[in-house]
Amino acid sequence: MTHIYYFSGTGNSFWSAKQIASLLGDECRLFSIGIETQKIPPAAHGIRVIAANAVVFIFPSYALGLPVVVRRFIKSLEIKAPYTAALVSFGSYQGGALAEAARLLGRKKIKLDYAGLIPAVENFIPIFGPPNEKTMRRRLALQKIATEQCALAIKRREIGTIKTFKPFSKAVSLMFHLGLRFMWRWFKISNACTGCGICARVCPAGAINMGNGRPQYSGKCQQCQACVNFCPQKAITLGRARPGNGRYTHPEVRAEDFYSKG
Ligand SMILES: Cc1cc2nc3c(=O)[nH]c(=O)nc-3n(C[C@H](O)[C@H](O)[C@H](O)COP(=O)(O)O)c2cc1C
Ligand code: SF4
Ligand code: SF4
């Protein structure tokens, strides 16, 4: 049995995780890191034991490093598996996300056998704005090819080398991690909000509560942009994610795929 652990805000990593599961052909189980992290009971001192034939992590690069929730998840693991792989989906440059994963696993005496790069569509709409049609198609095609290559490498149990986490990536990632404590306060909800609750249901961090029929954010937010991009009314705004601007979610992933999955 291969265990695939994914974290995904707008579906890129989730899409690749599903593709890899079907391409591997052997028995695969998909787990959401968001949900798994919320499940770890304090009584077990936050330790989760994974026993499998192979373990694969798939996550986006955030500010040249790992999403905080992925970092916490890896720290909580004890892995009993002969093969471990990590794949990062990214919009332009993944920086040190894979190196950070390798380092965290290494501290637990787990060797990261294979690290794979999956170029995908940039989803940080508040900063970069919505992708244009041509860029989107090009990046989706690259994602498909890279996902297939990674699946093949994992199937063959390939061993690769992982570059070290550069000081610049470390610094940017650290600033982002510190900023997470207050960045959730920047989201604004416009009057277009219908109170449908989709934003709360797609949130992989359980960071949104529907109070008084309106989303209420909390410090659990990971800045994954799921709420911004899946909101059918474009009612959640921040930076270039303005009411009139487009949004992005992977075209083959629906909001429902994320409901209760984290
Ligand atoms: C908060 C945040 C930070 C990001 N930082 C980077 C980055 O440093 N480098 C990069 O190439 N892409 C970056 N991205 C883009 C995502 O890594 C990329 O779009 C990824 O495929 C999204 O995966 P998902 O749809 O599974 O959430 C960032 C996205 C977000 C939301
Ligand atoms: S998804 Fe959009 S419309 Fe629905 S509750 Fe959230 S902000 Fe409001
Ligand atoms: S509140 Fe929005 S941006 Fe923050 S983790 Fe949840 S879905 Fe992602």
Image: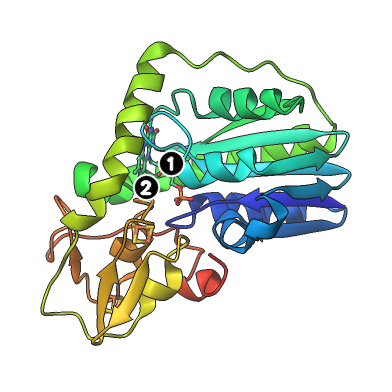
Q: Which residue is mark 1?
A: 139
Q: Which residue is mark 2?
A: 136
At x 44%, y 69%, the residue is 202
What amino acid is labelled 2 in the image?
A: Met
Instruction: Please rate how many residues cluster around mark 1, counting C-alpha atoms within 10 Å: few if below 14, some from 14 to 19, many from 20.
Output: some
Disc 2 under 8 Å from ligand 1? The reply is no
- Do the residues bearing badges 1 and 2 touch, measured as CB atoms within 8 Å? yes
As measured in the structure, the alpha-carbon distance from the residue carrying label 1 to the one carrying label 2 is 5 Å
> In the shown orientation, is residue 173 left or right of residue 35?
left
Counting from the top left corner in percent of width and height, residue 147 is at: 63, 41
Tag 1's secondary structure?
A: helix
What amino acid is labelled 1 in the image?
A: Arg
At x 54%, y 58%, the residue is 34
Say how many tags the image has.
2
Front in this rendered view, residue 22 or 191:
191
> In the shown orientation, is residue 77 left or right of residue 79?
left
| Residue 98: mark in rendering | none
At x 50%, y 65%, the residue is 253
Eyeballing the image, is 190 above or below 196?
A: above
Eyeballing the image, is 78 above or below 236?
A: above
- Please state the quadrant of the image where ligand 3 appears: bottom left
Q: Is residue 82 visible?
A: yes
